[in-house]
Image (cartoon, helix red, strand yellow):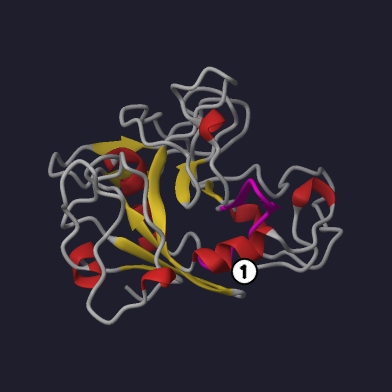
Amino acid sequence: LQTPISLLARAADFVGQTRAGPKLRGPKLRPGRAARRFFAGPEQATPGAADPVAVCETSMGTFKIQLLLEQMPITASNFIDLAKSGFYDGLHFHRVIPDFMCQLGCPYTRNLGPLPYTMNPLNLDQPGTGGPPVGSKFEVLDGSRRIIVRTRNYENPRGNIPDELTCKISNSKGTINMANSGMPNSGSSQFSINVADNEFLDFWDKQTDSAHPVFGYVVQGMDVVEEISKVQTGAKDSPEAPISM
């Protein structure tokens, strides 16, 4: 697919056979590929042979995400639908914190200039508050043909998806989670890439009220993600020089 985040037809086409039993820590490498270029996924992640890989091209380099469609069909299908529609085309990272995470996926970041960002007169469309339209739909790609309608659950007018708190895949370094407002069923298009082990974000961890389900992990280009997390930032941890997807 010719989009900024292009989904390869099959994960197996890129990383070889992915099933390796309960102790799987990431995809096997094709012969000749340098292992240091790949990131080992969490033990709980068991990508299926048909799970796609997202290729994310940014202004600072490219990284690739193994999506866990079989384990997290709703959350991964939401991401795939948005990527295929071009939703992420031209968006910018709006929050980066070293030794924590990088966040993107807000449509209000599409036309950012250097800090300070210019807001509209009513200060409504702030980076980090947007999402897909309320009422937009996507198919859950698990063979069920279920259709999910993104609903407005809270005062912020964006389309939200149901929480998928089913697989206990920890927010370890390199994993991708669904960002939300802290309220139930408030995930939308925004996602975070963990650059450290952030177990307190796990929905079953009771250190905090955070509940961010993991639906993928970086398999290549983790060094790019870490460099993004270390850039100079200003207000609200936004990069001083915009970083585009």
139 shown above or below 9: above
In this picture, residue 7 sits left or right of residue 132: left
In the foreground, 132 or 174: 174
Q: Is residue 232 left or right of residue 12?
A: right
Q: Quadrant of the N terminus?
A: bottom left
* Residue 85 in picture, x, y percent from top left: 39, 61
At a point 62% along the width and 33% down the height, the residue shown is 156
Q: In this view, which residue lies farthest toward the bottom?
A: 32
In the rendered image, which residue does mark 1 sit on? 244
User: Does residue 210 appear to the left or right of 231 in the view shown?
Assistant: left
In front of the other: 207 or 134: 207
Q: Quadrant of residue 110?
A: bottom right
Rendered location of residue 208, percent (x, y) = 60, 21
Residue for point 13% across, 44% down: 143
At 38% across and 49% down in the image, what residue appears?
Answer: 216
Q: Nearer the viewer, residue 104 or 42?
A: 42
- Write the start and end of the magenta stretch as one range: 89-104
Count the marks. Answer: 1
Quick check: can you spot residue 104? yes
